Amino acid sequence: MRSRVRAAGHAVHPILIVFPLGLLTTAVGFDVLHLVTERVSFAFTAAHLIAAGLLMGVVTAATGWLDWWLVVPRGTRARRIGLVHGLVNGAVLVVFAVSWALRLAVPDWIPGWPAVIAGWVGLLAGGLGGWLGGELVERLGVSVEEGAHPDAPSSLSGAPVSGR
């Protein structure tokens, strides 16, 4: 099932997912650093990483929903898993948005325990969402070029992928 949202021959959604995933995961890491060292700069950085992760998450989600809507056949397991994948990752964004909003209400963006716990819940849920995304690609073949194989030509060559 070839993705419709493409750039330079590749599906855009898997390219973009590294940004919100990396930013939000790193924010949790900076929360841990803040808890250990009590340095305000770590709390400040975590809050800004969350903001950037939320922005990139919205863009990434839009590309995923477009592919789900346009490409994944209705009535299939892939369609159901794709829906759960999108809903879980949407919930991740909501949980991190709550964590970010809780930080706005305090001086120096220092997170209280509810904000930190929300970050950890978001991180764990993000792991589930990522696993579901892996299931879509690796098990169900969503966004995998038809006929893909280890000696296929470069996507930039313009040559069609032919089965072996």
Image (tube, rainbow, N blue to C red):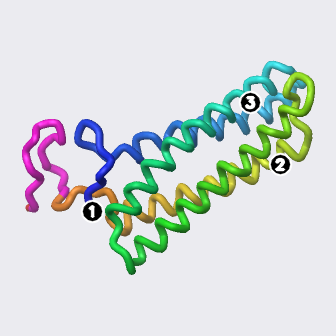
Residue matched to label 1: 1
Label 2 vs 3, first from the N-terminus? 3
Q: Which mark is residue 46?
A: 3
What element does badge 2 sit on? helix
Q: Which quadrant is the C terminus positioned in?
A: bottom left
Residue in front for this viewpoint, 85 or 161: 85
Left or right of residue 100: residue 129: left
* Magenta region, residue range: 148-163
Q: Which mark is residue 117?
A: 2
Q: Which quadrant is the N terminus positioned in?
A: bottom left
Give residue 41's position: percent from left, percent from top: 80, 19
User: Dot 2, how many residues are within 10 Å of its Cα: few (below 14), some (14-19), or many (20+)?
Assistant: some
Give residue 39's position: percent from left, percent from top: 86, 20
Label 2 vs 1, first from the N-terminus? 1
Judge whether 18 appears above or below 152 on screen: above
- Main secondary structure type of the part rendered in magenta: loop
Please tell me whether residue 162 belongs to the stretch shown in magenta. yes
Is residue 67 visible from the viewing direction of this image? Answer: yes
What element does badge 3 sit on? helix
- How far is disc 2 from disc 1 in space, using C-alphas? 38 Å
